[in-house]
Image (cartoon, grey):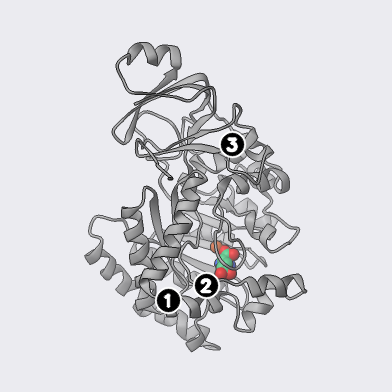
Amino acid sequence: MLIHSASQLICLRGGPQRGAHLGELDIIHDGAVYLQDDAILQVGTSADLLQRFPDEARLDAQRQVVMPGFVDPHTHLIWAGDRANEFTQRLEGKSYMEIMAAGGGINATVQATRHASSADLKKSTSSRAWSALRHGTTTLEAKSGYALDMPGEQRLLEILMELGTELPLDITPTYLGAHAVPPEFSGRTQDYVDLLVEKVLPQLKTWWRQRYTHQALPFVDVFCEPNVFNLQHTRVILSTAKSLGYPLKIHADEFENIGGAALAAELGAVSADHLVKISAADIRKLAPSASVAVALPCTPFGLAESHYTPAREIIAGDGLLALASDLNPGTAWCGNMQFVIALACRYMKLTPAQALAAATINAAAAINRQDKIGSLEPGKQADLLILNVPDYRHLGYRFGENLVQTVIKKGKVIDFS
Ligand code: NIG
Ligand code: FE
């Protein structure tokens, strides 16, 4: 198939974009892209490709933007129930951490998720995945973390893996057993950490290898925060995971800075996420490292807080910055990367070009998939969007409506009817 007459074909060639390079969109005006099966074969001008492939099936982009599908590298896609009551409590003055300490928060969703049937969980998760896809996300990372006991977490990972094969959307799984201390371990955080390190992580690896023979191990992630998993707990969990061969992620500096970002750099985590409270000293450690700094502006927005990740400082430190939604029932029930970009432009002062690159090629790097997705280059997977706008800057500039007209996943136009 030949997609032609794109007002702007946003190619993003050349790999993840660090520091001052962020936002190099590599635009072909009146561009075209030639797809074969599930891959991109050629990009060029419409004049050139129409002449070279005269007999191909054509899709006229009608002078609108064509770009790579969004990659959302941080979601908590799978859960049951909602926490609308907590939203009201927060507006009345209670903090997220106070609600969590009182047994609500993540553990409220853990109760609902443990009691939900697999069919119901699959249905609600699938509907959220379709909504993300409709808004242009063609690959997303999805974390377990709302069951916390081993069989329950395995069930969440299994459902995510099933959806990844059944839906026209790639799902990269993450094991987040260290999302909260489960109620049965209340007051015994160290015992729970010991269990994770001594039993769960090794057993999960064996189970995974038997069940998903050809799939890479999932990421292991930890919610590193005072009164959840402190720096020492996090270090033990992540270094054990690393020695077992799991790739690493971390929730760091979301509410307070206790050194999670520096730990991510030290351990070679693929990404360090949130970073709202990252210190200048930790920016100096994280930014030059290989770990991608993932900002999630829906989270402070969802919590009605005024501090956002200091993206400009991370970029100035030559960091690799990506954007993600954090889609979850507590802080940010939003899987729309266009809205993430709109927030990133306003509150983190990214330009639309920077935000677009952070939501595609750099987001792909945050899940180790930069060789396969995130740009329009020969050899990459044919995951593309046609927007209903003539200029990419409408992303960021506009918000609250869906600017995605057509989603193409692995070379096929998605039918949303
Ligand atoms: O990334 N902070 C930890 N995890 C989520 C929130 C999950 C929840 O509140 O259910 C986050 O913000
Ligand atoms: Fe999160």
Residue under numbered circle 3: 22
Q: Is residue 353 visible?
A: yes
- Residue 364 percent across, percent down from the top left: 46, 45
Question: Mark 3 or 2 closer to N-term?
Answer: 3
In which quadrant will I find the N terminus?
Answer: top left
Q: Which residue has dot 2 on it?
A: 81
In the depicted structure, whether residue 267 falls above or below residue 233 = above
Circles 1 and 2: CB distance less than 8 Å?
Answer: yes
Q: Residue at x 64, y 43 (%)?
A: 315
Question: For the residues marked 1 and 3, what is the alpha-carbon distance in whole angstroms?
Answer: 42 Å
Type of the residue with mark 2: Gly
Using the image as rendered, state which of residue 404 and residue 214 is in the foreground: 404
Q: Secondary structure at mark 2?
A: loop
The relative height of residue 240 versus residue 376 in the rendered view (above or below) is below
The residue at which mark 1 appears reads as: 116
Is residue 19 visible to the viewer in this orientation of the structure? Answer: no
Q: CA distance from mark 3 to mark 2?
A: 38 Å
Q: Residues within 10 Å of mark 3 (few under 14, many from 20)?
A: many
Q: Amino acid at mark 1?
A: Ala
Query: Quick one: label 1 or label 2, which is nearer the N terminus?
Result: 2
Residue 291: image location, x then y, percent: 51, 51
